[in-house]
Amino acid sequence: MTGDSAGPKRTLSAITLALFAGLAGAATANTPAPGSELARFQAYKQQQQSAFEQYRSAYLNAFDAYREAVLAHWDDAPLSDRHKLVQYSDDKRQRTEVDYQSGTITIAVVHQPDQLPDPAQIQASLAQLVQEDVASAQAADPIMAELDSAPGATVATPLPLVPELNQQLDGPEQDSHARLAQMVEDAEVNTRPRDYSAERLAALQAELKAQEQAALRELERQQELIALARAETPEQAEPEPVPASQSAAVVSQSLERQQALTTAYQARAEDPTSKQITTYRIQLPSQSQQKRARPFLPQAQEQSTQFEVALELVLAIMQAESSFNPMARSHIPAFGLMQIVPSSAGRDVREKFENSSQPPSAEELYQPDFNIRFGSAYLNILDQRYLRGVSDPQSRLYCVIAAYNTGAGNVAKAFNADGSRRLKSALPRINAMAPEAVYQHLLEHLPYEETRKYLKKVRSYQEGYAALGDTLRL
């Protein structure tokens, strides 16, 4: 199966599906005739733009509201992201944070100075974490609970949130309790006063600024999808700049959010109570990323075969995107192991392989099997459709990795002296280079530092999985 199965047809369906995210495309200079295909296309575009903007605003509103509730008790407010799962107790006075990159669990408690948390309370929290799986964590997610979306797929086999912890506690219940108690005893413990400082506020503001930049990059991706859908061939696609009104709307929304955060935080800073925060940092048993990948290996192997992409690449993308955290999310928003954006990669896969205009829901993308299928399919689209004009397979691989993060248009931009994102003008230069020269050029000229780092990481991870040879496969 290839990404070309839908063919480069200039149909209304192909054009409108490329616009599901709605943050795309300036109107044409000429007013279309009523009832024409272009008129229907523009009407659909406006409808979908409104739908997506409503979803994104609802997501950010839920995110901000929950963060403000957290800040009523804490001087910082980490929430779940790509590589961390963060859960708060119902009263917001205890926090459990699983860092999938560092292999640590941090349990923190807000308390009065003379009421240090009981180690038994920390042990009970670890025991509770053992009982959780992906489905239960998804159902308890306070941000996603505020959003209306389609029902998710069903997980056939419960997947533990922290496999390393579960494996450590196999065996008789009495022995498990003893091991939990030992983990708490060995934890790094720190107590500090709660401090609503300017530095902590700056860190929170920096997170909002990063969300703004991610949204602006997603606008570029949407423009690219429009150009690809409307072009006769991917090589002829030439994405237009993001309309100034759309960029301005994202920046304005970000400024409003930052001001609201500043106001709320300063109000908290005037709280006269002198509470403290005690953290227990627990190092999980050492486990390689290859072992962490193993629960997802059967599906990765199946989908890499079906969509004709290397298994090593699928696993490397998963590791770079989420550190194998099935509850990973970023605030574009993107969801799951391979960080699929419903309105771009998710929509693209649905169109090319399922002939559907319905983008995947967050609940669906949190399901590991579903997510791996969509991520593998999108790699196929990049390799066998959008970047098929790159003749050398190794050079194309480097371009695909970069494009997974930033889009094919920005890959083209790295090679075009005029800064355009047109593949047709970039291909001759790419194809004149040796693969290693293509790789080095991408590292030096990709528009975003994040993508340059991403390319290096994924290449390193892929080479590590490739070195395992047949032992990687089931």
Image (cartoon, rainbow, N blue to C red):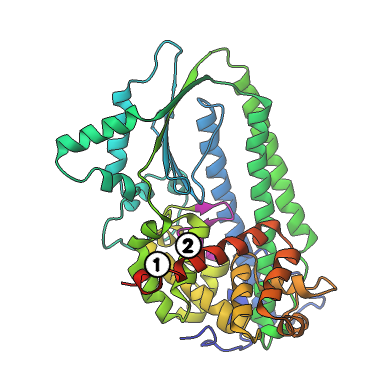
The amino acid type, in three-letter code, at marker 1 is: Phe
Residue with the mark numbered 1:
370
Quarter of the figure that contains the N terminus: bottom left
Indicate left or right for 272 with 39 as reference. left
First in sequence, mark 2 or 1: give its number.
2
The magenta-colored residue range is: 329-342
Q: How crowded is mark 2: few (under 14 residues within 10 Å), some or many (20 or more)?
A: many
Measured from the top left, where is residue 327 in percent x and y?
43, 52
Q: Determine which residue is flagged by label 2.
A: 318
Q: In which quarter of the image is residue 122?
A: top left
Q: Is residue 18 above or below residue 175?
A: below
- Which amino acid type is shown beneath numbered disc 2? Met
For this view, does 396 lie left or right of residue 470? right
Closest to the observer: 377 or 18? 377
Residue 136 location in percent, x, y? 32, 48
Image: 118 above or below 70: above
Q: Is the magenta stretch mostly helix, strand or loop?
A: loop
Q: Indicate the secondary structure of the residue bearing disc 1.
A: helix
Estimate the x, y position of residue 422 in percent, counting from the top left: 75, 78
Q: Is residue 51 above or below residue 269?
A: below
Find out whether the residues at labels 2 and 1 contact each other: C-beta distance under 8 Å. no
Dividing the picture into quadrants, the one containing residue 373 is bottom left
**Residue placed at 48% from the left, 49% from the top?**
101
Quadrant position of the C terminus in the picture: bottom left
**Left or right of 137: which side holds 157?**
left
